Image (cartoon, grey):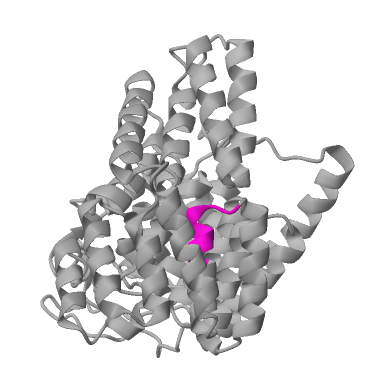
Amino acid sequence: MAPRPVADKLRFDGYELDVRAGELRKHGLRLRLRGQPLQLLEMLLERAGQVVTRHELQSRIWPAKTFVDFDHGLHNAIARIREVLGDSAETPRYIETLPRRGYRFIGALDEEPGRQTVLSREQNSLWANTFEERFAVILKLQSEITRAIAREVDVRLRPPNLTRPTRSRSLNAEAHECYYKGRYCWNKRTEDSLQQALEYFQQTVQHDSTYADGYLGLADTLNILGYYNVMPPREAFPKAKAAAIRALQLDDSLGEAHATLGVVKRDFQWDWQGAEDEFQRAIELNSGYAESHHWYATLLNMLGRPEQALNAMLAALELDPISLAINTDLGRTFYFARQYDRAIKQFKKTMEFDRTFGITYLWLGRVLEQQGFLDEAISHLEKGTSIIGGSAYARAQLAYGYARAGRKNDALEILQQLRELSQRRYVSPYDIAMIHLGLGDHDEAFAALNQAAAERCHWLGYLRVEPQLDALRADARFADLLSRLGILGRSALE
């Protein structure tokens, strides 16, 4: 079948691709799709219903003179199209994958100007038949990587920008060594390891004040310290922002720094659209950086967009299949979507991968609480708290579990410990709120949540989707909190 005559505008399901302007819109709103992904979508629309082969795509979009990994570029372009369209490789509405052959647009074009009728393949629930095929490939890759690591080295020291072409520069050996040590500590995600990472990244920029990745590592560590309530948000996140901006001043092609700024806008400024813009800019500059997709998925979870969050998290996992943080946060994506069985399966798989990552135990405990398995939940919460080192965040979650299980005295004991600890170091009001919530004291819980809002605690970003907070949703004070955070509505791109 010959290609259809090329039109100036191609329409489907409310979308309009303006070929001449090189823009994709939905209901008149321009979406962030450009470059090779936009060209690829145009080819698929021109041949709607037909298979466009990998060879044809390579010849037109990635000619021989283009110095790029074709497979990597094609994968990322397809992933970007699906992300913008809210599509799924497992239950596609628009883009179908034909393994080793190519791709096909399976929707139906509306060639009549003005009509925007839904004519795509009948939608199936994402959760009914979700990600098993794609995830099986990831599991196989994880197994292969694990065996390779076991043969070579006992730790993983990969810098975050390994996939990004770097500018030619003379590296300071001491700075580079400190940087790698910092990333190793950063990946462990315990309170002590994060403090060590902070010291290593500070040493990195002391050895070489022009080392952009050193400032990036510093910013990422400060973000995590703020994320897990180790540092006050008003101290951690502004410092992270300054370090990320310094990294961009040294290297304006550093897409990773835009992802880091996206975290600041998401977790501290509560600038949801600004955060989305930063993450999309990061992916545009370096689509191979896993954390950009990972942190973007977290934003999508907060905004109550679970299908897009799952797609973004799987994209991150494909890029970094042995990341314990990403594996754990895939489980969190199911947790926030109330898909508890899938969350449990994912957390347990992650724990089999590495049994020393305490965060996973805490989240598995939270899922088991929601299912009513309180004794088992407490067992995992205690294990996670022990591994992490008794952080205030972990102890608060444990106290919540104790309270839910009727162990009021144990919960009150931790509450008193945290109050005493707050005289010496930062303890987040959100952690205090969770204990009061578990104890059933809603007035004290709201008082602490309001204090958390005044301190810009990032956990409030999950208000819309956090199951632990369901007991408060009917209270008018809860709606007031949502309104203050500006997360009642959907993203501006929806």
Q: As displayed, is residue 386 above or below residue 51?
A: above
Q: As displayed, is residue 344 above or below residue 288?
A: below
Kindly identify the residue that appears in the image at 54 percent across and 77 percent down: 402
Q: Quadrant of residue 230?
A: top left
Of residues 145 and 241, which is closer to you in this image? 241
Q: Quadrant of residue 113?
A: bottom left
Of residues 427 and 151, which is closer to you in this image? 427
Question: Percent position (x, y) of residue 397?
Answer: 50, 67
Kindly identify the residue that appears in the image at 58 percent across and 47 percent down: 189
Instruction: Please give left or right for residue 447 compared with residue 144 in the image.
Output: left
Instruction: Please give left or right for residue 273 compared with residue 86 in the image.
Output: left
Q: As displayed, is residue 254 above or below residue 459?
A: above
395 in magenta:
yes
Question: Percent position (x, y) of residue 314?
Answer: 54, 63
Q: What segment is highlighted magenta in the picture? A: 390-397
Of residues 312 and 99, which is closer to you in this image? 312
Q: Overall secondary structure of the magenta stretch? A: helix
Instruction: Please give left or right for residue 421 compared with residue 14 in the image.
Output: right
Residue 195 visible in this rendered orientation of the protein: yes
Instruction: Please give left or right for residue 273 compared with residue 378 in the image.
Output: left
Kindly identify the residue that appears in the image at 59 percent across and 59 percent down: 359
85 in magenta:
no
Question: Percent position (x, y) of residue 160?
Answer: 55, 37
Q: Quadrant of the N terminus?
A: bottom left
Residue sticking out furthest to the right: 151
Q: Quadrant of residue 256?
A: top left
Kindly identify the residue that appears in the image at 36 percent across and 54 percent down: 428
Q: Quadrant of the C terminus?
A: bottom left
Question: Percent position (x, y) of residue 85?
Answer: 34, 68
